[in-house]
Structure formats: C-alpha cells, structure tokens
Image: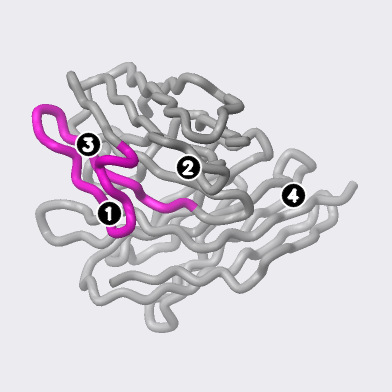
Amino acid sequence: AQKITQTQPGMFVQEKEAVTLDCTYDTSDPSYGLFWYKQPSSGEMIFLIYQGSYDQQNATEGRYSLNFQKARKSANLVISASQLGDSAMYFCAMRGWSGTSYGKLTFGQGTILTVHP
Amino acid sequence: SAVISQKPSRDICQRGTSLTIQCQVDSQVTMMFWYRQQPGQSLTLIATANQGSEATYESGFVIDKFPISRPNLTFSTLTVSNMSPEDSSIYLCSVEGLSVNTGELFFGEGSRLTVL
C-alpha cells in the first residue's frame, strides 16, 4: 500500500520569492516514482516534475526542483521566483515499480498555493 | 506528451440520469485511466481500461455504476449511471507518457459534472 501526505492545506508566497511545498510518502515498494502536478482553477492536471527512487540527483525542471530525501521519505517541491500564474492546487503523487510495470498513481490531498503581488 | 481531449468539458445533469464522457488521445496507448475528483478532494482512480479486455475497477467502484468502453487504442468512454448529487465531480482520463521508464501520467482537461 502507498500513502502520500501533504500537510500544508494552503501556502502563501510573495511574487518572486521561493516556496517549498511539503510531501512525505510511505510505500513497501523497493522502487518507485514520485511526481508533482499542478491543477489551476480550470481543473486540468499539469505534470511538473518526476523523481525516480534510485536517482542520485534531485530533479529539476525550469523553476521547479524536487528536494528528494529518501531516508526521510520526503519529496518536497521547490518553486523559485514565484509568479502570479503559479497560484493553483499542487498534488504530490507516486507510483510503485514492480520491475516490469508501474502500479497505480496515488495522490496526496494537495496544497493550495496563493502567490501575492 | 500525448494530447488528450475530453467531452463534455462540463455538464449539469438531473438525478437518475446517466452521462457518457468521451476521451480521445492523439496517439495509440495501451492503458487509459479514469479518475474522479470530488469537490475539494484529491484524485481517486476509478478504473484502468485496456483495449480488448474488461476494465479493472478499484475498490469502491463497480462496473454497473461506471461502465467503461475501450473500442480502440485511442478512445475510451466512461459512463456515470443513475447519477445522484454525490456523483458531482471532475472526471479525468489519463494516459502514460512516452517515457515508460518514468511512469508519469498525462491528463485530459477533465469533465466537470454537477448533478442536481
């Protein structure tokens, strides 16, 4: 079984500042993938970044970086230089890897990020 | 990433009726996934649809309530049957990305259903 925990229901950040969204996870799978998605008010789900459990380096995609601490089972999303358009719901998610295929994608409860001008 | 189109984007439905949501992908994919997002909640997987076989439903979801079709490798439908206000949700279809090594899913725009 997998569990994703996002303890911050809401976060506020000033425009141009950096913000960290927390995510912890629990799984019995020896190998897994961790993902972050953005959901604007329109409802679409936008894939942001991926981190593999055996990746040695933290993933980065433009202004997004993933602070992966495997021993602590955390996969925090860092957004640098926040923009007004970053205001949205953010979901952390994971999929276990069996060696031949991925399991289902499990989501956390989400964090609403509000960027103030 | 695949381009995924869903119809309808939103609808208002009467209690007791059924609605079919369509999902069209611009490339052939083996598996398609249907998720539900109730208001203010996270996403929950309803079922996985493979072409040529019966969909696999998650605990708490049954075929009679959420029948799924998968007639080919680019198309699927989800029907929400005998709707009640509790079915008011965003329904999203998703597919795996081109990189099977990373396992990310890409989502359609969602179908926002309101049941009165």
Same-chain check, marks 4 and 2: yes
How far apart marks 1 and 4 lie (CA) works out to: 37 Å
All told, the count of numbered labels is: 4
Point 10% across, 53% down: residue: A100
Q: Amino acid at mark 1?
A: Glu
Mark 4 vs 2, N-terminal side: 2
Which residue is at the front of the view, A97 or B113?
Answer: B113
Where, by quadrant of the figure, is residue B14 drawn? top right
Q: Is residue B61 above or below residue A4?
A: above
How far apart marks 4 and 2 lie (CA) works out to: 17 Å
Q: Tell me whether circle 3 and circle 2 mark residues in contact (CB < 8 Å).
A: no
Residue A47: image tag? 2
Point 37% across, 29% down: residue: B1
- Closer to the eye: label 1 or 4: 1
How far apart marks 4 and 3 lie (CA) works out to: 38 Å
Where, by quadrant of the figure, is residue B105 drawn? top left
Q: Amino acid at mark 4?
A: Ser
Residue A56 at x, y = what percent?
A: 34, 66
Q: Which residue is mark 1?
A: B58
Q: Which residue is mark 4?
A: A82
Q: Tell me whether circle 4 and circle 3 mark residues in contact (CB < 8 Å).
A: no
Q: Which residue is mark 3?
A: B49
**What segment is highlighted magenta in the picture?**
B43-66
Residue B25 at x, y = what percent?
A: 33, 21
